[in-house]
Amino acid sequence: MPKVTVKNTAGKDVKEIELKDFVFGVPSNDTLLHQVYVAQTGNARKAIAHTKDRSERSGSGAKPWRQKGTGRARAGTKKSPLWRKGGITFGPNKHQNWSKDTNQKMRQKAVMIALSEKIRSGKMIVIDSLNYPEQKTKLFSATLAALGITGKSLVFCLTGDERASALMSRNIPRVENTPTEMLNVVQLLDREYIVLTEAGIKNLEGRFASWNKPSAQ
């Protein structure tokens, strides 16, 4: 079983705990991580750029001049892309859709793989509890300094009553707060470190308990 050292808010080692293999000891699978990451970022993407095609341009629909006899090229509408202020051909539009579908097992497995990679690379920091006399940003900043990750990008996972501590870290640059049960692949791959408590570890192991398959006898 993988092990991790638990620290306190002062950065001192408190103890070492064993982690569940089915959550924190999953082999690498870059293909699955990439597939789920692309799907989730695509689902969150919104089309902003938009150009009007000929059906959206304002103006008369009348034929500019008769078909024959003028000596000029045929023209059916002023909204033609060939005309100044006409519609745009093949331009970006607000109807673009980048969404992709992934099933629940893929998303869950990807999170466990990303968590396992954090353990293997030493980028997961576990603290015993969030015991602060008051909810002050400077206190949490002192904890980050004690842990040696000041200025690093990190996702701060909170569970249960710990969510009140989000007030302490939400104004710190490069720190993202998330409930432990909502942790996803995008957050884990976009951030260098993950910080959570022992309670958060138990929450994650409970979240993925269905993957704890008994070994064959």
Image: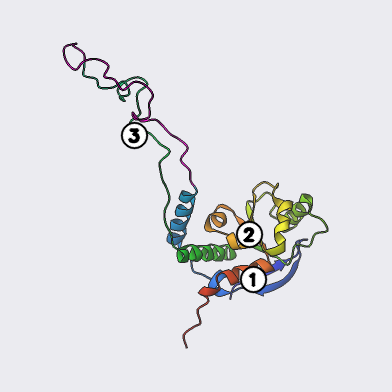
The residue under the point 49% across, 66% down is: 109
Q: Earlier in the sequence, mark 3 or mark 1?
A: 3
Q: In which quarter of the image is residue 165?
A: bottom right
Q: Is residue 72 above or below residue 41?
A: above
Residue 49 among magenta residues: yes
Q: Where is residue 29 in the image (x, y as percent from the top left)?
A: 45, 64
The residue under the point 78% across, 62% down is: 131
Q: Position of residue 37 (x, y in %)?
A: 48, 55
The residue under the point 29% across, 23% down is: 82
Magenta stretch bounds: 45-72
Q: Mark 3 points at which residue?
A: 90
Direction from residue 173 to residue 84 in the image, left or right: left
Residue 29 among magenta residues: no
Q: Name the residue under label 2.
A: 179
Callout 3: helix, strand or loop? loop
Q: Where is residue 121 in the image (x, y as percent from the top left)?
A: 58, 62
Inspect the image, locate mark 1, and give the three-letter code of the amino acid beneath it.
Answer: Lys
